[in-house]
Image (spheres, rainbow, N blue to C red):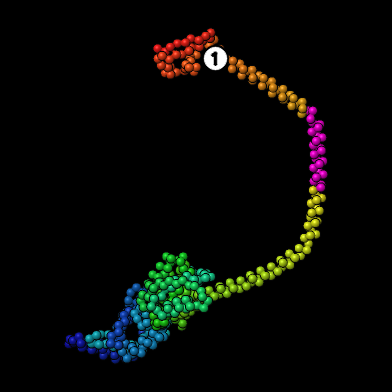
Amino acid sequence: MEPITLYELNELVKETLELGMPDTYWVQAELSEVRVNNGHCYVEFVQKDRRGSGLVAKARGNIWRNVFAILKPTFEQSTGQLFTAGIKVLVEVSISFHELYGYSLNVIDIDPSYTLGDMARKRQEILRQLQEEGVLELNKELDMPMLPRRIAVISSPTAAGYGDFSNQLMNNQGGFYFYTELFPAIMQGDGVEQSILQALDIIYSREDEFDVVVIIRGGGATSDLTGFDTYPLAAAVAQFPLPVITGIGHERDDTVLDMVSHTRVKTPTAAAEFLIDRMQEVAGNLADLTQRLYQGSAALLAENKERLLRLQTRIPTRAMQRINDYLLYLMNVRHNISQAVMLQIERQKQQFPLIRQQLIQLSMSIIDKSRFQLALYQQKIADASPDKLLARGYSITLKDGKVIKDVSLLKSGDEIVTRLKNGEVTSIVK
């Protein structure tokens, strides 16, 4: 066989493919790459194995400018999803082969319903996982504070929806005061999940400072909502310890974030109205309670006034009856006391001779004891007398009439007197 050139081989492949597969085919695939250049869109289709860990097929695709200008807005409007890498699509393609660029698929049409189904399936998978973990309804089960005045707001600081929300709260007709603090976050594009998670982490560290969390996003394309359909963000909101209110400006479909939050409203303004209505409801209840308290107090006062009037008419009669009862009681007490005193006097008269005799005996006994003690004291005093001490041979030395007990108190030339039993001796100290 004669050899052929590469170009000739590729030309043969092209002819074979185009003749053998002239029809168009509906193909299910995932977009792994999307590039737009001069209005043309260049994509890469892939198919992963069932475990999602490896590729089993890959093909290059082209969406020419005239087709892409129609398919892209139709797809994004229908699905609320950007035409971007990472989504699954069902596309109608024709097969082409170029001698230089090789095999590729030319996209003719796209079925948005397939992508919608895949997005719904992903949402259901997230919700099912949260249900299995037992956290799906946790935030919904939290009690909404009676007065949600301290509000942590997660939003883009430049978003018109944030301004609408703040103005609605500040200018409420009830004159209710709300404290709001903004925790800035990206609310569209690739950074939605991470920035909202970071904001939630900061609020969690200051949990005691707030009553509720409000996540709002005003306006914008519905195709920017994919960031709100992620498991990490849904799990964080579902398990957050404060009630979370979502108002991300998307009326048609609920995101996963809407499904796990405590309360879902349509717009940022509706979120503000929800909080105002909550305050208004409490204020109304307080007004009703005040009216009921006033009416109840008036009725109670009237009832007690009538009862006091009835009692007032009965006081004189009851008072005289009580006075007479006490007078009779006092007379009986007086009679009983008199009888008790006379009886006690008679008993004392009978016992007086015996008591007198006992007192005399007790007195004599005390006198005898005192006499004995006195004799002992006299003997001790006599034994301690200076005369008795002198009679035993002791002497007393005096100077100027004072007893000398320490020789150091004397000096040469002092005159001292020594007292003995039968006289005194005068001496001069040398």
| The residue stretch that appears in magenta | 331-354
Q: Is residue 299 above or below residue 7?
A: above
Estimate the x, y position of residue 321 in percent, counting from the top left: 80, 56
Which residue ends up furthest to the top in the rendered image? 422
Could you tell whether 381 is left or right of 227 in the image?
right
Q: Amino acid at mark 1?
A: Pro
Q: How dense is the environment of label 1, judged by Cα within 10 Å: few (below 14), some, or many (20 and up)?
A: some
- The answer to which quarter of the image holds residue 219 is bottom left
Residue visible at 51% across and 74% down in the picture:
176
Question: Which of the image's four quarters has the C terminus?
Answer: top left
Estimate the x, y position of residue 392 in percent, counting from the top left: 53, 10
Q: Is residue 78 above or below residue 294?
A: below
Q: Main secondary structure of the magenta part?
A: helix
Residue visible at 62% across and 73% down in the picture:
291
Question: Which of the image's four quarters has the N terminus?
Answer: bottom left
Q: Nearer the viewer, residue 398 or 305?
A: 398
Is residue 78 in view? yes
Q: Is residue 223 magenta?
A: no
- The answer to which quarter of the image holds residue 89 is bottom left
Could you tell whether 60 is left or right of 114 in the image?
left
Identify residue for label 1.
386
Q: Nearer the viewer, residue 153 or 82?
A: 153
**Element type at mark 1:** helix
Is residue 135 in view? no
Could you tell whether 403 is left or right of 157 in the image?
right
Estimate the x, y position of residue 283 in percent, counting from the top left: 56, 73
Q: Nearer the viewer, residue 14 or 324?
A: 324
Could you tell whether 25 is left or right of 306 in the image?
left
Q: Is residue 344 magenta?
A: yes
Estimate the x, y position of residue 112 in percent, counting from the top left: 40, 85
